Amino acid sequence: MFGRKKTKLQKDLDILEEMAEDLSSYLRTDALFGPMGPNRPKMTLGGYLMREHRLLALQGNLSQPEKNRLLKARQTFENTVMEWVVATEKKAVQEIEARMRQWQETIRDLRENAVKHWPYYHTAVEARVMLTLLLKLLSRPPFKPNDEFVNRLAVLDQALFVAWYSDASAFVWDEDWASAYPAAEFEFLYGKLRNSGIQ
């Protein structure tokens, strides 16, 4: 007997649990992208935080057993972070640098040829969402906020927004996720480039 097809949120929960369980061993490696099972994304702090953010915001769509699983995964993550504070900060900084480069390359590509590169924006913008959440992680104790990263990111965003058309009805991801990403904080998910050829 076949079960119902899992929703994207349920898949997020499966991945979140695996990432929380693997976090301790991941933090003890030098690799930024940790291996996970087949048909799974690479393990990163940003990947965990992106899914946790979405699941917390949309947990009204989860069953009680799924909410319990989410709570347990979060507790595992927080306990591991507190045990490995220095390693967590080091890994977060490493990922911020990498995601910053990805975001810079995305903006460069869009400015050079928006028509060609805009169809890939919905995937590329994951890096920008992860940057928001990684910086939020480092802004809370016991970590120290990093103004240099915040300022560098603001400069990159400005390069995008020069040609950005904000549109509250043009969410670039699955519409079911929109309530998890308020436009005031995630402006880069709502709109399109003026020169992208998209009407």
Image (tube, grey):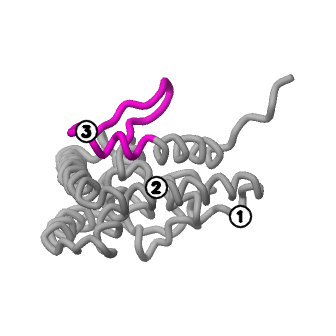
| Magenta highlight range | 22-43
Residue with the mark numbered 2: 77
Residue 32 lies left or right of residue 185; in this view the side is: left
Q: Quadrant of the C terminus?
A: bottom left
Q: Residue at x 50, y 61 (%)?
A: 53
The amino acid pointed to by label 2 is: Phe
Q: Which mark is residue 29?
A: 3
- Residue 134: x %, y % from top left: 32, 61
Q: Secondary structure at mark 2?
A: helix
What residue sits right under mark 1 in the picture?
A: 60
Place residue 56 in its image quadrant.
bottom right
Q: Position of residue 33 (x, y in %)?
A: 30, 37
| The N terminus, quarter of image | top right
Left/right placement of residue 14 relative to residue 44 reads right
At a point 20% along the width and 51% down the height, the residue shown is 94
Say which residue appears at 69% left-offset and 58% top-offset: 67
Cα distance in 3D space between marks 2 and 3: 17 Å
User: Which mark is in front, 1 or 3?
Assistant: 3
**Disc 2 packing (10 Å; few <14; some 14–19; many ≥20):** many
> Image quadrant of residue 123?
top left
Q: Is residue 35 magenta?
A: yes
